[in-house]
Image (cartoon, rainbow, N blue to C red):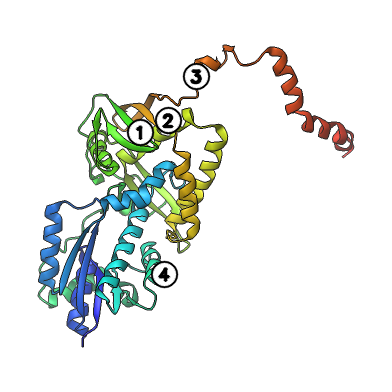
Amino acid sequence: MSKKIVLGFSGGLDTSFCVKYFTEEFGYEVHSIIVNTGGFSNEELKQTEAHAYKLGVKTHTTVNAIKSYYDSIIKYLVFGNVLKNNTYPLSVSAERLVQALHIADHVKALDADAVAHGSTGAGNDQVRFDMVFHIEIPGVEIITPIRDLKLSREAEIEYLTSKGVEMNFAKAAYSINKGLWGTSVGGRETLNSKGLLPEEAWPTQVTKHNAEEVELQFENGELIGVNNKTFEHPSEAIQYLQTLAGPFGIGRDVHVGDTIIGIKGRVGFEAAAPMVILKAHHALEKHVLTKWQLQWKDTLAQFYGNWLHEGQILDPVMRDIEAYLEKSQRTVTGKVFIQLLPYRFQIIGIESKYDLMNSAFGKYGEMNTGFTGEDVRGFSKIFGNQTSIYHKVNGAAHEEG
């Protein structure tokens, strides 16, 4: 009886090689699966399915994971205003984990003997996939021919051609990975420590040049409306906002970061909707949360983002942090007004019934109504009392030293 293997399939060169290699060299029964996290159109998914069957898979499964991707990960990235190294909204790293979990579920459903992915040995994805598989489907063999055979692109093309496979082997000048939470762009300019991506490299070209104002409606920290248009699910609001902000060229940048395997790397990305949402959400929070809520949320969110980036989505501490983040959003409700401009945007302001910047309690730099000048004098002495004692006790010693 042939070995039953589930393959995470994108339809590209690497996973196409895997299908042919498994079926032709070992006679494996290959079941391909593609997990759509917002990067594929319906037509592209149909083409990928047809390509998989043409290569020789036994079955092909398409999973629409857009909503579950938001519910399980993106929601918490918004709650935490997570930007890796204050720059990158974790576009690719977050979706890989959702893909790995769905692939693992498919392995369980089919009672497969092995699972495979097309990762190379040079990036983060191999660790993310392997780690999830080790935890979710322990004992199932993990097969990674591209990594294990150290295959070059040319070798893969030569093998597929010898097997009569016809597909577009032309290598695009830039590697593009599109998803709900942004698009990564890699090319020769990102391989070194210096270099900007040219205009033609960006998937979304700038076609809007006149300023536009948008209104975002948040409810308990989640985006539910854009410009008085409401949506059944926040993922739909994200996609709609992307159509408005993307043509301005907003959210473009190059991220420099540490990989899981210890090397540093650069990657370009465009994430118009994610960047606008994160900054708008943070602006609303600064009005409705206290300073210590903001402080502790930032501390936990930074850890959450870093641990997520390194593939640790299944660590129980992540559920604990998610519980805190969710509870912190109970008053993060209101409207945020943003001006969109070519290559940038700015927050105009917010409206919320929970706004703590309330004139009834005073106006910063002008008038206070909750206390007197004498109250402040006494408070200032008490607030600085311990520091004052320290300097009185240690002042002479410091001078002598």
Is 77 placed left or right of 165 in the picture? right
Query: Which quarter shows the N terminus?
Result: bottom left
Amino acid type of the residue tagged 3 in the rendering = Asn
> Please, what secondary structure does the residue beneath circle 4 have?
helix
- Mark 2 and mark 1 in contact? Answer it, CB < 8 Å: yes
Residue 286, horizontal then vertical, whole percent: 48, 30
- Residue 193 vertical placement versus 298 (above, below): below
Label 4, on which residue? 135
Label 1, on which residue? 218
Is 244 placed left or right of 353 in the picture? left
Q: Distance between the residues labelled 2 and 1?
A: 9 Å
Residue at the bottom extreme?
1
Residue 341, horizontal then vertical, whole percent: 30, 28
Residue 150, horizontal then vertical, whole percent: 32, 74
Q: Nearer the viewer, residue 214 or 249?
A: 214
Amino acid type of the residue tagged 2 in the rendering = Leu
Res. 284 mark? 2
Q: How crowded is mark 1: few (under 14 residues within 10 Å), some or many (20 or more)?
A: many
- Residue 247 vertical placement versus 132 (above, below): above
- Residue 280 vertical placement versus 299 (above, below): above
Q: Earlier in the sequence, mark 3 or mark 2?
A: 2
